[in-house]
Image: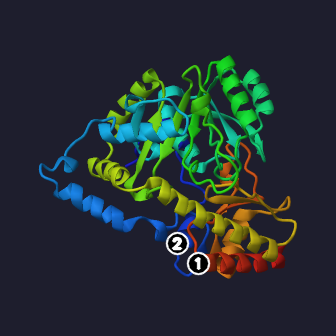
Amino acid sequence: MTPKYAQRMAKVQPSAIGELLALGADPSIISFGGGYPDATLFPADQLDAVFHEIITAPGGAAMQYAPSNGLARLRDQVAGLMRADGVACTGDDVLILQGSQQGLDFAARMLVDPGDVIVTEDPTFLGALIAFAPSQPDYAVVPVDDEGMQTDRLEGILAAQPRVKMIYTIPDFQNPTGVTLSLERRKALIALANSHDLIVLEDTPYRHIRFAGHNLPTLKSLDTEGRVIHLGSFSKILVPGMRIGWAVANPDLLSRMGQLKVAADTQTSTLNMAAASLFLDRYDLNAHIATLRAAYAIKKEAMLDAIRRHFPQEIMATDPQGGLFTWLTFPEGFDATEFMRHVALPQARVAYVPGATFFPLTPRANHARLNYSAPSLSAIETGMAALGRALHANL
């Protein structure tokens, strides 16, 4: 049998790094590839108590169906988190998602027809490109520097691209580079979206993992025309396995995303929503986040220190003020994918994410993303030393 696939499947392709990351799952390999939190910091005891309580509660409400837009109590709690972060909203402005990844899919399906243009940072989050692919978009890309998306370049791109429907950005500790969009550029991005009548998709899974500098306002808090769809997540600040994310947007956009939610999965898990809500009622999320920040700050410094000591001097690494990643830039002509395949994995026994696949239009092979949140401090030192020896021998 030869299935007659829909045209949209032409852009839904296996990731080029899938094979390499599968090899990196070997327990004898030190992996810096995944965007994983530190599992030793999961609040397992508190979640054990929470799940036990909601499962054994009379009536079994946590095991029943729930409203498609999410449990009302949890939506109110998320709205409270958003208000504490400067966004005026209520529970009615919140849609609970199956992780914020689902919001990427919904936004593209809601707004983008085949051939429409999505503007992204260059590089950008690989998972977003995967989520957008079924909508068959074209891309326009904006370079990033130490202050994030170069909004002076964005203006010219928008003028030259009449089919732009949406600007996608990760303004805080961007994946993969770790850089943060400056306040001046945040204001410029909103002004450009207003003048060109565009939607901004603000993806903020790492926002609360700041361990240096000062908080900057969300794009949603700067939004005066209802253009920003804000995506948030508990995956990095609680546990990813619960798959709880959210969207905050104007009523019309949120209603349309809610319709897609019904079509996709009817609702997010009642059990997980109830557990997240009770955790927020019972325990101090901010204290838990403070623990994460302190631990990840130490790990980031350990990784950058190890890179400085072990890597060839011509290799550059970003120094993020938060989040989970640093971004490596190798000399021109270096192919991080081939090096991982033939040297890093088999010889150094180290895995990372090659950078080429993060570029929507023109892959650049001389980059890689390293995750410092998941591995232990000893694994960071051992892995960076092994990778450094391999790089010295092959550059």
Helix, strand or loop at label 2? It is loop
* Left or right placement of residue 263 versus residue 103 in this view: left
Crowding around mark 1 (Cα neighbors within 10 Å: few <14, some 14 to 19, many 20+) is some
Say the numbered circle drawn on residue 29: 1
Give the residue number, with chain letter if any, for mark 2. Answer: 25
Image quarter of residue 114: top right
Mark 1–mark 2 Cα distance, whole angstroms, equals: 7 Å
Relative image position of residue 230 (x, y in whole percent) = 53, 35
Does any portion of residue 96 appear in the rendered image? yes
Query: How many numbered badges does the structure rendering display?
Result: 2
Looking at the picture, does residue 394 appear above or below residue 189?
A: below
Relative image position of residue 211 (x, y in whole percent) = 64, 57
| Towards the viewer: 356 or 382 | 382
* Left or right placement of residue 225 versus residue 304 in this view: left
Q: Are marks 1 and 2 in contact (CB under 8 Å)?
A: yes
Q: Amino acid at mark 2?
A: Ala
Find the residue positioned furthest to the left. Answer: 59
| Towards the viewer: 110 or 302 | 302
